[in-house]
Image (cartoon, rainbow, N blue to C red):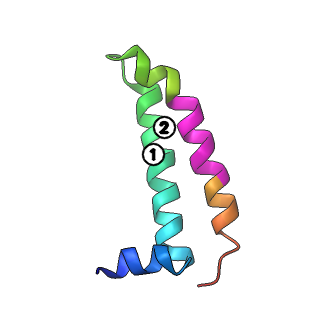
């Protein structure tokens, strides 16, 4: 099992922050792309979930 998966399972800050950051970046990408309306529709909620997740996991132990 990779160290990333182990970190997620052990609730370590690093892997969860990386996942939250990827969600935020994905939400911003979905917001700015001009091709699919369904991606634009869900972009705000994906960005919001990533932001809230980042705030929560910033309290996890390193």
Q: How many marks?
A: 2
**Image quarter in which the N terminus is found:** bottom left
| Classed neighbour count for the residue bearing mark 1: other residues with Cα under 10 Å, few (<14), some (14–19), many (≥20) | some
Magenta stretch: residue 51 in it? yes
Tell me what residue is drawn at x 63 percent, y 41 percent. 48
Q: Is residue 42 above or below residue 47?
A: above
SS category of the residue bearing label 1: helix
Q: Is residue 42 above or below residue 17?
A: above
Magenta stretch: residue 59 in it? no
Picture coordinates of residue 36, whole percent (x, y): 35, 17
* Residue tagged 1: 25
- The residue lying furthest to the left in this view is 1
Residue 10 versus residue 44: which sits nearer the camera? 10
Left or right side of 19 for 54: right
Tell me what residue is drawn at x 53 percent, y 38 percent. 46
Picture coordinates of residue 28, whole percent (x, y): 48, 36
Left or right side of 39 for 50: right
| Classed neighbour count for the residue bearing mark 2: other residues with Cα under 10 Å, few (<14), some (14–19), many (≥20) | many
SS category of the residue bearing label 2: helix
Within the image, what quadrant is residue 47 found in? top right
Tell me what residue is drawn at x 65 percent, y 76 percent. 60
For the stretch drawn in magenta, what is the main secondary structure?
helix
**Image quarter in which the C terminus is found:** bottom right
Q: Which mark is residue 49?
A: none
Tell me what residue is drawn at x 63 percent, y 49 percent. 51
Picture coordinates of residue 49, whole percent (x, y): 60, 45
Q: In this picture, which residue range is highlighted in magenta?
A: 43-52
Give how far apart the Cα atoms at labels 1 and 2 are: 5 Å
Within the image, what quadrant is residue 2 found in? bottom left
Q: Are marks 1 and 2 in contact (CB under 8 Å)?
A: yes
* Residue tagged 2: 27
Picture coordinates of residue 52, whole percent (x, y): 67, 51
């Amino acid at each position: 099992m990779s160290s990333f998966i182990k970190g997620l399972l052990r609730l370590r800050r690093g892997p969860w922050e990386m996942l939250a950051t990827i969600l935020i970046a994905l939400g911003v990408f979905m917001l700015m792309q001009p091709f699919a309306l369904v991606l634009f529709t869900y972009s705000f909620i994906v960005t919001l979930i990533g932001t809230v997740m980042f705030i929560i996991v910033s309290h996890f132990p390193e």
